[in-house]
Image (tube, rainbow, N blue to C red):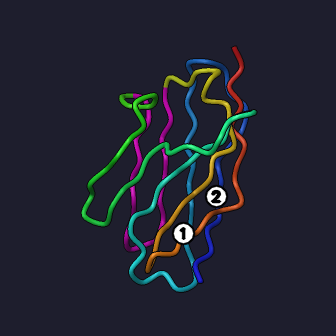
Amino acid sequence: QVQLVESGGGLVQAGGSLRLSCAASGSIFGINPMGWYRQGPGKERELVARIYSGGFTIYADSVKGRFTVSRDNAKNTVSLQMNSLKPEDTAVYYCYAAKSRNDYWGQGTQVTVSS
């Protein structure tokens, strides 16, 4: 089993920045990829960004150029730097990890962007 714990959500004005972090624990060997998803009000959960152990990244079109995902393999953490935030970025953000065909999720952290 893999446990994921997020931190760093909150309330920010449009144009501001936030940084989310996620720490993995438990059976962490072989986790790949890690990343972030989000679920806005009345919406389905959607990919924000993924990062693979070699550094390859995938971003949703809506966040390209504004968000940056990073990973510390030694510390088993993944972070999401969010800049130029928009009200439409308001959502619960979930840390994600995959291992041996299983998906793992954090409990979620709320990000609210006010206009």
Q: Nearer the viewer, mark 1 or mark 2?
A: 1
Secondary structure, mark 2, is strand
Secondary structure, mark 1, is strand
Near-viewer residue (81 or 103): 103
34 shown above or below 18: below
Q: Amino acid at mark 2?
A: Glu
> What distance separates the C-alpha of mark 1 from that of mark 2?
16 Å
The reply to whether the C-beta atoms of the residues labelled 1 and 2 are less than 8 Å apart is no
Near-viewer residue (2 or 39): 39
Image-quadrant location for residue 91: top right
Give the position of the C terminus as an image quadrant. top right
Residue 80 colored magenta?
yes
Q: Earlier in the sequence, mark 1 or mark 2?
A: 2
Q: Residue at x 58, y 21 (%)?
A: 86
- The residue beneath circle 1 is 103
Relative to 58, is 39 on the left or the right? right
Residue 20 colored magenta?
no
- The residue beneath circle 2 is 6
Image disc number at residue 42:
none
Q: Amino acid at mark 1?
A: Asp
Give the position of the N terminus as an image quadrant. bottom right
- Residue 4 image position (x, y, % from top left): 61, 68
Classify 10 Å Cα crowding around label 2: few (below 14), some (14-19), many (20 and above): many
Relative to 103, is 54 on the left or the right? left
Please report the bounds of the magenta region as a residue range: 66-83
- Residue 65 image position (x, y, % from top left): 36, 28
> Majority secondary structure of the magenta segment?
strand
